[in-house]
Protein backbone atom coordinates (compact mmCIF):
# COMPACT_ATOMS: atom_id res chain seq x y z
CA UNK A 1 0.00 0.00 0.00
CA UNK A 2 2.91 2.34 0.72
CA UNK A 3 3.95 1.96 -2.91
CA UNK A 4 0.39 2.49 -4.12
CA UNK A 5 -0.36 5.79 -2.39
CA UNK A 6 1.50 8.90 -1.19
CA UNK A 7 -0.63 9.99 1.77
CA UNK A 8 -3.97 9.80 3.55
CA UNK A 9 -5.81 11.96 1.03
CA UNK A 10 -4.41 9.97 -1.85
CA UNK A 11 -5.43 6.60 -0.43
CA UNK A 12 -8.96 7.83 0.22
CA UNK A 13 -9.18 8.93 -3.41
CA UNK A 14 -7.98 5.48 -4.49
CA UNK A 15 -10.64 3.79 -2.36
CA UNK A 16 -13.33 6.03 -3.88
CA UNK A 17 -12.17 5.08 -7.36
CA UNK A 18 -12.26 1.39 -6.45
CA UNK A 19 -15.78 1.78 -5.04
CA UNK A 20 -16.99 3.44 -8.23
CA UNK A 21 -15.57 0.56 -10.27
CA UNK A 22 -17.06 -1.95 -7.81
CA UNK A 23 -13.65 -3.35 -6.89
CA UNK A 24 -12.61 -4.55 -3.44
CA UNK A 25 -9.27 -4.12 -1.67
CA UNK A 26 -8.68 -6.76 0.99
CA UNK A 27 -5.82 -7.68 3.34
CA UNK A 28 -4.87 -11.28 2.62
CA UNK A 29 -2.80 -12.22 5.68
CA UNK A 30 -1.89 -10.99 9.13
CA UNK A 31 -4.02 -9.81 12.02
CA UNK A 32 -6.45 -7.96 9.75
CA UNK A 33 -6.69 -10.60 7.04
CA UNK A 34 -9.89 -10.69 5.01
CA UNK A 35 -10.69 -7.06 5.94
CA UNK A 36 -12.25 -5.20 3.04
CA UNK A 37 -10.72 -1.74 2.92
CA UNK A 38 -13.44 -0.57 0.56
CA UNK A 39 -16.38 -1.62 2.78
CA UNK A 40 -19.02 1.11 3.17
CA UNK A 41 -22.10 1.67 5.29
CA UNK A 42 -25.16 0.36 3.45
CA UNK A 43 -27.23 3.50 4.18
CA UNK A 44 -24.79 6.41 4.16
CA UNK A 45 -22.41 4.98 1.55
CA UNK A 46 -19.42 6.22 3.52
CA UNK A 47 -16.43 4.14 4.54
CA UNK A 48 -16.94 2.19 7.72
CA UNK A 49 -15.35 3.85 10.72
CA UNK A 50 -13.13 0.83 11.37
CA UNK A 51 -11.97 0.81 7.76
CA UNK A 52 -11.30 4.54 7.79
CA UNK A 53 -9.30 4.20 11.01
CA UNK A 54 -7.25 1.34 9.55
CA UNK A 55 -6.60 3.19 6.32
CA UNK A 56 -5.57 6.38 8.07
CA UNK A 57 -3.28 4.43 10.41
CA UNK A 58 -1.56 2.64 7.55
CA UNK A 59 -1.21 5.86 5.58
CA UNK A 60 0.27 7.64 8.61
CA UNK A 61 2.77 4.80 9.10
CA UNK A 62 3.75 5.04 5.44
CA UNK A 63 4.26 8.79 5.64
CA UNK A 64 6.36 8.34 8.79
CA UNK A 65 8.54 5.79 7.04
CA UNK A 66 9.13 8.05 4.04
CA UNK A 67 9.88 11.06 6.26
CA UNK A 68 12.41 9.08 8.27
CA UNK A 69 14.12 7.87 5.11
CA UNK A 70 14.28 11.42 3.77
CA UNK A 71 15.72 12.78 7.02
CA UNK A 72 18.34 10.02 7.24
CA UNK A 73 19.36 10.66 3.63
CA UNK A 74 19.80 14.38 4.24
CA UNK A 75 21.74 13.72 7.44
CA UNK A 76 24.08 11.39 5.57
CA UNK A 77 24.66 13.96 2.81
CA UNK A 78 25.42 16.70 5.33
CA UNK A 79 27.84 14.43 7.19
CA UNK A 80 29.61 13.58 3.92
CA UNK A 81 29.87 17.26 2.97
CA UNK A 82 31.36 18.03 6.38
CA UNK A 83 34.09 15.48 5.66
CA UNK A 84 34.85 17.07 2.30
CA UNK A 85 33.06 14.52 0.12
CA UNK A 86 30.92 15.75 -2.73
CA UNK A 87 28.09 13.82 -4.29
CA UNK A 88 27.47 13.29 -7.95
CA UNK A 89 29.76 12.22 -10.75
CA UNK A 90 33.43 12.92 -10.27
CA UNK A 91 34.83 15.48 -12.72
CA UNK A 92 36.73 14.37 -15.81
CA UNK A 93 40.33 15.30 -16.51
CA UNK A 94 40.51 18.82 -17.88
CA UNK A 95 42.05 19.26 -21.31
CA UNK A 96 44.82 21.38 -19.80
CA UNK A 97 45.80 18.55 -17.45
CA UNK A 98 45.29 15.68 -19.89
CA UNK A 99 48.72 16.15 -21.47
CA UNK A 100 50.39 16.00 -18.07
CA UNK A 101 48.46 12.87 -17.15
CA UNK A 102 49.47 11.19 -20.41
CA UNK A 103 53.12 12.10 -19.89
CA UNK A 104 53.06 10.79 -16.33
CA UNK A 105 51.45 7.55 -17.51
CA UNK A 106 54.17 7.04 -20.11
CA UNK A 107 56.76 7.62 -17.38
CA UNK A 108 55.31 4.72 -15.39
CA UNK A 109 52.77 6.41 -13.14
CA UNK A 110 49.85 4.10 -12.36
CA UNK A 111 46.24 4.92 -13.20
CA UNK A 112 45.24 4.80 -9.54
CA UNK A 113 47.97 7.26 -8.58
CA UNK A 114 47.00 9.63 -11.40
CA UNK A 115 43.36 9.47 -10.29
CA UNK A 116 44.38 10.49 -6.77
CA UNK A 117 46.62 13.28 -8.04
CA UNK A 118 43.91 14.79 -10.26
CA UNK A 119 41.00 14.02 -7.89
CA UNK A 120 39.07 12.12 -10.54
CA UNK A 121 37.95 8.55 -11.06
CA UNK A 122 40.12 5.86 -12.60
CA UNK A 123 37.72 5.73 -15.52
CA UNK A 124 38.44 9.38 -16.29
CA UNK A 125 42.17 8.67 -16.37
CA UNK A 126 41.61 5.64 -18.58
CA UNK A 127 39.67 7.82 -20.99
CA UNK A 128 42.48 10.37 -21.09
CA UNK A 129 45.13 7.72 -21.84
CA UNK A 130 42.94 5.32 -23.82
CA UNK A 131 45.24 5.19 -26.85
CA UNK A 132 48.25 4.48 -24.61
CA UNK A 133 46.79 1.43 -22.86
CA UNK A 134 48.31 -1.98 -23.70
CA UNK A 135 45.00 -3.39 -24.91
CA UNK A 136 44.58 -0.55 -27.40
CA UNK A 137 45.50 -1.56 -30.95
CA UNK A 138 45.46 1.16 -33.53
CA UNK A 139 44.70 -0.34 -36.93
CA UNK A 140 45.50 1.87 -39.87
CA UNK A 141 43.28 1.70 -42.92
CA UNK A 142 46.18 1.09 -45.32
CA UNK A 143 47.72 -1.67 -43.20
CA UNK A 144 47.23 -5.03 -44.94
CA UNK A 145 45.74 -7.91 -43.00
CA UNK A 146 48.38 -10.28 -41.61
CA UNK A 147 48.86 -13.59 -43.38
CA UNK A 148 47.57 -16.66 -41.59
CA UNK A 149 49.55 -19.92 -41.52
CA UNK A 150 48.34 -22.63 -43.90
CA UNK A 151 49.06 -26.36 -43.57
CA UNK A 152 50.02 -28.12 -46.81
CA UNK A 153 51.22 -31.68 -47.36
CA UNK A 154 54.69 -31.68 -48.93
CA UNK A 155 55.76 -34.89 -50.70
CA UNK A 156 58.59 -36.70 -48.97
CA UNK A 157 60.92 -36.37 -51.97
CA UNK A 158 60.51 -32.58 -51.83
CA UNK A 159 61.13 -32.56 -48.09
CA UNK A 160 64.31 -34.63 -48.48
CA UNK A 161 65.60 -32.27 -51.17
CA UNK A 162 64.86 -29.14 -49.15
CA UNK A 163 66.53 -30.50 -46.01
CA UNK A 164 69.78 -30.68 -47.95
CA UNK A 165 69.30 -27.28 -49.58
CA UNK A 166 70.31 -23.87 -48.26
CA UNK A 167 67.28 -22.31 -46.56
CA UNK A 168 66.82 -19.19 -44.50
CA UNK A 169 65.84 -19.40 -40.84
CA UNK A 170 62.09 -19.06 -41.44
CA UNK A 171 62.04 -21.72 -44.14
CA UNK A 172 64.20 -24.06 -42.07
CA UNK A 173 61.96 -23.61 -39.02
CA UNK A 174 58.83 -24.37 -41.06
CA UNK A 175 60.46 -27.52 -42.39
CA UNK A 176 61.73 -28.68 -38.99
CA UNK A 177 58.33 -28.15 -37.37
CA UNK A 178 56.53 -30.17 -40.04
CA UNK A 179 54.59 -33.28 -39.07
CA UNK A 180 55.48 -36.53 -40.82
CA UNK A 181 52.53 -38.48 -42.20
CA UNK A 182 53.33 -42.03 -43.31
CA UNK A 183 51.76 -43.14 -46.59
CA UNK A 184 52.66 -46.73 -47.50
CA UNK A 185 56.39 -46.91 -48.19
CA UNK A 186 56.70 -43.14 -48.52
CA UNK A 187 55.60 -40.16 -46.47
CA UNK A 188 54.45 -36.57 -46.68
CA UNK A 189 55.50 -33.68 -44.49
CA UNK A 190 52.65 -31.48 -43.28
CA UNK A 191 54.19 -28.01 -43.25
CA UNK A 192 52.37 -25.14 -41.55
CA UNK A 193 53.53 -21.72 -42.72
CA UNK A 194 52.25 -18.50 -44.22
CA UNK A 195 51.68 -18.56 -48.01
CA UNK A 196 54.84 -16.53 -48.66
CA UNK A 197 56.99 -19.26 -47.11
CA UNK A 198 55.26 -21.95 -49.17
CA UNK A 199 55.95 -19.95 -52.33
CA UNK A 200 59.62 -19.60 -51.41
CA UNK A 201 59.92 -23.32 -50.72
CA UNK A 202 58.40 -24.26 -54.06
CA UNK A 203 60.77 -21.82 -55.77
CA UNK A 204 63.73 -23.67 -54.24
CA UNK A 205 62.37 -26.95 -55.67
CA UNK A 206 62.59 -25.82 -59.29
CA UNK A 207 65.78 -27.84 -59.96
CA UNK A 208 63.70 -30.99 -59.40
CA UNK A 209 61.25 -29.96 -62.12
CA UNK A 210 64.00 -30.23 -64.71
CA UNK A 211 64.39 -28.02 -67.72
CA UNK A 212 66.14 -27.64 -71.06
CA UNK A 213 69.38 -29.60 -70.94
CA UNK A 214 68.74 -30.76 -67.37
CA UNK A 215 65.93 -33.31 -67.32
CA UNK A 216 64.79 -34.23 -63.85
CA UNK A 217 63.85 -37.56 -62.38
CA UNK A 218 60.27 -38.49 -63.21
CA UNK A 219 59.27 -39.19 -59.60
CA UNK A 220 60.80 -35.93 -58.43
CA UNK A 221 59.13 -33.95 -61.23
CA UNK A 222 55.79 -35.49 -60.28
CA UNK A 223 56.29 -34.69 -56.58
CA UNK A 224 57.34 -31.14 -57.40
CA UNK A 225 54.32 -30.62 -59.63
CA UNK A 226 52.01 -32.01 -56.93
CA UNK A 227 53.37 -29.62 -54.28
CA UNK A 228 53.31 -26.72 -56.75
CA UNK A 229 49.63 -27.38 -57.48
CA UNK A 230 48.84 -27.26 -53.78
CA UNK A 231 50.76 -24.03 -53.30
CA UNK A 232 49.10 -22.43 -56.32
CA UNK A 233 45.72 -22.69 -54.59
CA UNK A 234 46.90 -20.14 -52.02
CA UNK A 235 46.27 -16.46 -52.55
CA UNK A 236 49.23 -14.65 -54.11
CA UNK A 237 51.28 -12.70 -51.59
CA UNK A 238 52.42 -9.91 -53.85
CA UNK A 239 54.39 -9.18 -57.00
Image (cartoon, grey):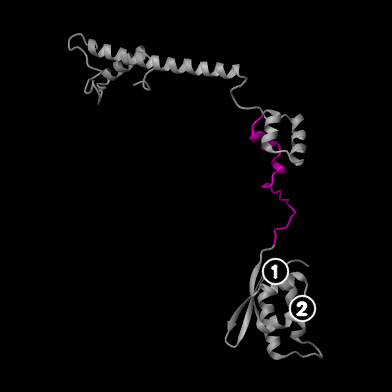
Front residue of 108/226: it is 108
The image position of residue 92, as x and y in percent, is 67, 30
Identify the residue under disc 2.
204
- Quick one: label 2, few (<14), some, or many (20+) residues within 10 Å? some
Number of the label disc, if any, that sits on residue 195: 1
In the rendered image, the residue lying farthest to the left is 43
| x, y percent for residue 59 | 34, 15
Place of residue 196 in the rendered image (x, y in percent of width and height, measured from the top left): 73, 69
Residue placed at 71% from the left, 48% from the top?
A: 138
Left or right: residue 154 compared with residue 203: left
Magenta segment boundaries in residue numbering: 120-146
Q: Is residue 180 above or below residue 73?
A: below
In the image, is 55 to the left or to the right of 165? Answer: left
> Given the current orientation, which residue lies at the most extreme top position?
44
Q: Secondary structure at mark 1?
A: helix
Residue 139 among those drawn in magenta: yes
Specify the quadrant of the image occupied by residue 105: top right
The image shows a total of numbered marks equal to: 2
Task: Tell me, yes or no, whether the two marked residues, 2 and 1, touch with CB atoms within 8 Å.
Answer: no
Amino acid sequence: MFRLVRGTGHILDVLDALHCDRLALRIHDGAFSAMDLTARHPRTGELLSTVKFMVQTLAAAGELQRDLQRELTYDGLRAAEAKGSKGGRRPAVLAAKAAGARTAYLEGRSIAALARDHHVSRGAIRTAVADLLPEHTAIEEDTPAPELPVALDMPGKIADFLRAAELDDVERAALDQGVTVRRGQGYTLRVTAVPAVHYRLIARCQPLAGGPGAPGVTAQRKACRKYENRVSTLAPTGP
